[in-house]
Amino acid sequence: MKNVIAIVCIIAMIVACSSAKKSGDNTAMGDSSVENDTIRIANDSLDYEIIIFEPGFNSWLATQQPRGFYNQNYLEQKNWRYVVTYNNRVTSYPYSTTGLYPQQIDYQPDIDYGYEVNYLLYHYFLYFQREYNQNL
């Protein structure tokens, strides 16, 4: 009798796991939820690339002010301030050990990265501060 109960439990677990996997595959996005949270913007002529891969960033971004709400000059000034603070924390002892600041961001204030890059970088910094309870 114990063997029958054990076999039924094992079969139930296999069925439950396979049905959960199938229901995940039937979603519109499938396994692209990770890809959906990755944003990549590149410009080969300026040799820059910005990649944001934070789970939940896209859904959070959809709740923020729309593109065009801030002007590019405002975004550039805020981004420069955030980048300087962020880069200082990459090399500062108390912050560098947390793992929140893995590498420096190469953002030059004299390069015109365009509105989209500045918009996404600005909102990433807002998201980063909120999500990880940091104050840049």
Image (cartoon, rainbow, N blue to C red):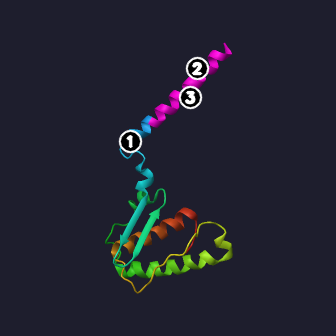
Residue at 52 percent across and 66 percent down: it is: 128
Q: Residues within 10 Å of mark 2 (few under 14, many from 20)?
A: few
Instruction: Please tell me which of labels 1 and 2 falls first in the chain.
Output: 2
Magenta region includes residue 20: yes
| Residue 132: image tag | none
Amino acid type, mark 2: Val
Image x and y of residue 30, in percent = 40, 44
Q: Residues within 10 Å of mark 3 (few under 14, many from 20)?
A: few
Q: Is residue 94 visible?
A: yes
With 56 as the anchor, is 100 left or right in this view?
Answer: right
Give the residue number, with chain letter if any, for mark 1.
Answer: 27
Q: CA distance from mark 1 to mark 2?
A: 29 Å
Give the residue number, with chain letter if any, for mark 2.
Answer: 8
* Disc 3 to disc 2: CB gap under 8 Å: no
The main secondary structure of the magenta stretch is helix
Image x and y of residue 19, in percent = 46, 31
Q: Which residues are magenta?
A: 1-21
The quarter of the picture where the C terminus appears is bottom right
Residue at 53 percent across and 81 percent down: it is: 84
| Residue 13: image tag | 3
Find residue 120 and report its image quarter.
bottom left
